[in-house]
Image: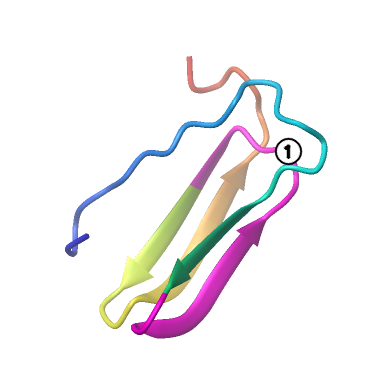
């Protein structure tokens, strides 16, 4: 990815209760983000140096339709 780019990952609408996602930047930054709770959409803002600046998590299911 380059600054200003976006990537979309889709998951199952009804995932298993133990599903989780781990976002890492091997070799670039020690930052990581683990998502384990139910969510509809997660925005992760990454700044130069592969640092996570902030995240926003939305739980309003069906809001993306």
Q: Which residue is drawn at 26% across and 78% down?
A: 48
**What x and y, as percent, mark residue 56?**
54, 52
Left or right: 18, with 54 as reference point? right
Image quadrant in which you'd find residue 61: top right
Q: Residue at x 45, y 57 (%)?
A: 44
Question: Is residue 11 rendered magenta in the image?
Answer: no
Classify the position of the N terminus by image quarter.
bottom left
**Front-most of residues 32 and 59:** 32
Left or right: 53, with 42 as reference point? left
Q: Is residue 22 above or below residue 50?
A: above
**What x and y, as percent, mark residue 31?**
50, 79
Magenta stretch bounds: 26-42
**Front-most of residues 17 and 37:** 17
How are the colours assigned in the image? rainbow
- Which SS class for mark 1? loop
**Front-most of residues 2 and 25:** 25
Left or right: 5, with 23 as reference point? left
Question: Circle 1 is placed at which residue position?
Answer: 38
Callout 1: 10 Å neighbours few (<14), some, many (20+)? some
Image quadrant in which you'd find residue 40: top right
**What x and y, as percent, mark residue 24?**
47, 69
Q: Which residue is drawn at 80% across and 43% down?
A: 18
**What x and y, as percent, mark residue 4?**
19, 57
């Amino acid at each position: 990815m380059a600054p200003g780019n976006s990537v979309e990952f889709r998951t199952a609408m009804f995932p298993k209760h133990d599903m989780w996602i781990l976002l890492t930047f091997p070799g670039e930054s020690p930052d990581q983000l683990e998502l384990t709770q139910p969510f509809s959409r997660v925005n992760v803002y990454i700044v130069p140096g592969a640092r996570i600046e902030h995240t926003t998590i939305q739980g309003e299911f069906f809001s993306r339709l």
